[in-house]
Amino acid sequence: MDPMLVDYSIWLLMAIGVAAILYSSVGHGGASGYLAAMALFGLEPSIMKPAALVMNIFVTVLVLYRNYFICRFNWRLFIPIISVSVPMAFLGGAYTIQSSAYRAIVGLLLILAVWRMFWQADDVVNQEQPRLWVTMPVGGILGFVSGLTGVGGGIFLSPLLLLFRWTDMKGSVPIAAAFIFFNSIAGLSGYLSSGGSWPADIPLLIGVAVTGAVIGTGLAANRLAPMGLRRVLGLVLVVAGVKMIMTA
């Protein structure tokens, strides 16, 4: 059977929708949630990577549309990061690793994503512009990992922005969303340029993710992002991450 031909179960689609709701409510594309759902349902890396990237692209378009005009966008911070991350994401997308290595790396990233979901930082901004020798390597590393695995990278960029006090919580939202958007396009382009195939029924996955994002961005606008849902997804990420590592 062609691995690109998959009978997506209703439970998988529901899991993707829930992930899109939660992640879009905090300004992210949701790739780690989509990867966790697909891992739990036993999908192959050849499906997981492109599917997560393409869902990321469509969800972050909506997130950016909802947030760009209400959150200040720091172009001076964003441009050095994205200028390196995009070509590195393309290289990561074009690079194919063995299924066992992919599972181990993604499993670890999913577990790290749980820490990010519950991590809090003080909303203090350093007024000094960050050095290029710091921001550009950060963009390059996260970009390559983004393209290699299908994780958009925003879930790891956001805590770094806050940890180094390059911006505040509100300012990190559009930067992370734009970072995910451009890296996902670059990663997907690299994947396709190396002969990768589209998963079957990709419009169905996009439709489910976008529907979830419509709900999630609405919750964000009304400050109703559900903590209970976050805890459930955190558990799913841990279980999926452990499963990926154990089956590597």
Image (cartoon, grey):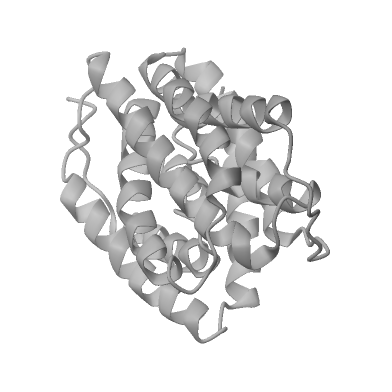
Q: Can residue 68 be seen in this view?
A: yes
Query: Based on the displayed image, in which of its 4 quarters is residue 121 positioned?
Result: bottom right
The quarter of the picture where the C terminus appears is: top right
Residue 10 picture quarter: bottom left
Q: Is residue 190 left or right of residue 38?
A: left
Q: Which of 122 and 38 is in front in this view?
A: 122
- Up the image or down, 103 lies above or below 61; here it is above
Of the 4 image quadrants, the one containing the N terminus is: top left
Residue drawn at point x = 73 percent, y = 33 percent: 131
Q: Position of residue 72 (x, y in %)?
A: 55, 65
Residue closer to the observer: 114 or 65: 65
Q: Which residue is drawn at 72% across and 50% down?
A: 166
Is 5 placed left or right of 163 in the picture?
A: left
Residue 44: tell me if it is visible.
no
Q: Can you give x and y, in whole percent of width and height, for residue 240 in the image?
A: 57, 44
- From this viewpoint, which residue is outermost toward the bottom? 222
The residue at the point 52 percent across, 26 percent down is 84
Q: Is residue 59 above or below residue 242?
A: below
Q: Which residue is drawn at 55% across and 44% down?
A: 78
Q: Is 92 in front, or is 232?
A: 92
Percent position of residue 59, x then y: 35, 57
Total marks placed:
0
Q: Position of residue 218 (x, y in %)?
A: 42, 80
- In the displayed structure, 247 sits above or below 116; it is above
